[in-house]
């Protein structure tokens, strides 16, 4: 839950930043339009004052650079906002999965000692979810007429690649 509040604040901050950047960009765009119009008026007068023209050209160039920088900052902030929203959605999904697992009758997660070999393993809903996923991936298989499980060749590879476990 603490992470959720942090991400929500990050999203709100990014939304505020994007609004500020949009406002700044709009100001730069308006100033650019005004500077281009000023240059047009200056040239229409027919008396070329090179210092005045240089001054206007520098102002236009600076405003174009400001517009470009504002566009880049907007793009960066927008990408960060999309990323933060995706993280918030993933966190929400993880909380929902945890709540569903806790709602079941079984314990969420606990250590458990195998009753035949007296070796510890993960019990509860987490252990069941891991086992189900390993069955789906065909990493484990049940031994015939037994509760025992075997690790398949694909399971040996998958456990090594995913968890760095060599069994």
Image (spheres, grey):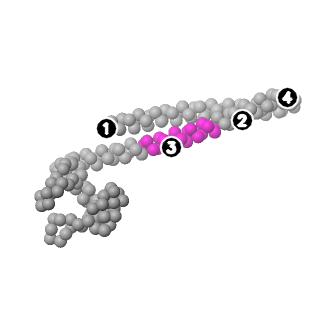
What residue lies at 31% left-to-right and 64% top-to-bottom? Answer: 156
* Residue neighbourhood size for the residue with mark 2, other residues' Cα within 10 Å, grouped as few (<14), some (14–19), many (≥20): some
Q: Residue 148 carries which label?
A: none
Asked which quadrant contains residue 60, the reply is: top right
Q: Which residue is labeled 4 in the image?
A: 49
Q: Which-is-in-front pick, marks 1 and 4?
A: 1
Instruction: Give the mark, 1 or 3, whose residue is nearer the N terminus.
Output: 1
What residue lies at 21% left-to-right and 53% top-to-bottom? Answer: 122
- Seen in the picture, residue 77 relative to 107 is either above or below; the reply is above
Q: Is residue 159 magenta?
A: no
- Seen in the picture, residue 76 relative to 153 is either above or below; the reply is above
Q: Which residue is labeled 1 in the image?
A: 1
Q: Give the range drawn in magenta.
A: 67-85
What residue lies at 28% left-to-right and 49% top-to-bottom? Answer: 97
Q: Which residue is labeled 2 in the image?
A: 61
Q: Which residue is at the front of the view, 120 or 42?
A: 120
**Disc 4 on helix, strand or loop?**
loop
Q: Which residue is labeled 3 in the image?
A: 79
């Amino acid at each position: 839950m603490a992470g959720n509040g942090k991400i929500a604040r990050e999203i709100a901050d990014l939304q505020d930043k994007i609004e500020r950047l949009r406002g700044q960009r709009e100001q730069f765009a308006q100033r650019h339009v005004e500077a281009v119009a000023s240059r047009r008026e200056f040239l229409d007068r027919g008396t070329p004052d090179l210092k005045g023209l240089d001054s206007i050209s520098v102002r236009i160039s600076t405003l174009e650079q400001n517009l470009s920088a504002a566009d880049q900052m907007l793009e960066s902030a927008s990408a960060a906002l999309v990323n933060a929203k995706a993280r918030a959605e993933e966190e929400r999904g993880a909380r929902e999965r945890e709540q569903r697992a806790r709602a079941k009758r079984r314990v969420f997660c606990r250590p458990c000692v195998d009753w035949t070999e007296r070796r510890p393993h993960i019990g509860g809903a987490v252990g069941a979810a891991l086992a189900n996923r390993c069955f789906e991936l065909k990493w484990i298989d049940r031994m015939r007429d037994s509760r025992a499980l075997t690790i398949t060749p694909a399971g040996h590879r998958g456990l090594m690649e995913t968890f760095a476990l060599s069994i």
